[in-house]
Each structure stands twice: as C-alpha cells, then as structure tokens.
Image (cartoon, rainbow, N blue to C red):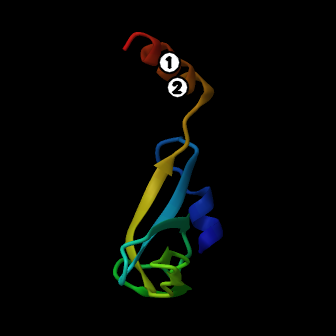
Amino acid sequence: MKKELEEWDPFGWNTEITTELICDKCGYKKVKEWDDRDFVFAKTKDKCPCVCKKQKCKGPMVVRGIYLVKEKTKEELKWEKIEAQWR
C-alpha cells in the first residue's frame, strides 16, 4: 500500500506524506515519515526523546496529524528569495 501511495500524485507535485507526533506528558513535537499504520490520535511505540528537568521524559507519543507536504521547486525557491529582498 505504501508503494501505491508513493506513486499517487494527484496534482503533479512532488509530494510527501508526513506524520506529526506529540508527547502526552510534555508536549514535545516530532515529524516523521508516514507509515500506513499511522492514524490520528493513535498512541505509537515511540517514546518521547525530550530531556525535561534533567531527566528523560519517555512519555507516550500520539499521532496529532497526517499531512501531505509539497516540496518546493527551484523556480518557487527563486521567487521566494526575490520577494524576501523586497520586504
């Protein structure tokens, strides 16, 4: 299924699917590559890598969102630089 989704590109963009994880204890956020077993509000096997108050948190990581991310083309990056110069 993952291979099918990698080939799926509805808008002709170079896209990537990512999963946003958040720690239940401390709120630490992490973005990782999407896995076909990920769904929103699911607890994962991942533990929080955050060091809070001089000790490791190790709280459960929960899937907060799944996003389709478009990678920018060279042309878009070029125009962003030009726009930034005029701000």
Q: Position of residue 29 (x, y in %)?
A: 44, 67
Q: Which residue is mark 2?
A: 76
Q: Residue at x 42, y 60 (%)?
A: 67
Do the residues under discs 2 and 1 have CB atoms within 8 angstroms?
yes
Instruction: Find residue 79 and name its label.
Output: 1
Q: Relative to residue 51, is residue 28 drawn left or right?
A: left
Task: Say how many tags the image has.
Answer: 2
The secondary structure type at the circle numbered 1 is: helix
- Real-space CA distance between mark 2 and mark 1, rounded to the nearest whole angstrom: 5 Å
Q: Percent position (x, y) of residue 83?
A: 43, 16
Disc 1 marks a residue whose amino acid type is Trp
Across and down, in percent, residue 44 comes to 49, 86
Instruction: Tell me if 64 is positioned left or right of 71 in this view.
Output: left
Find residue 33 and report its image quarter: bottom right
Q: Is residue 85 above or below residue 64?
A: above
85 left or right, relative to 46 = left
Outermost residue on the front side: it is: 54
Query: Where the C terminus falls, by quadrant?
Result: top left
Extreme top residue here? 86
Determine the residue positioned at 60% across, 66% down: 4
Between 63 and 87, the one nearer to me in the picture:
87
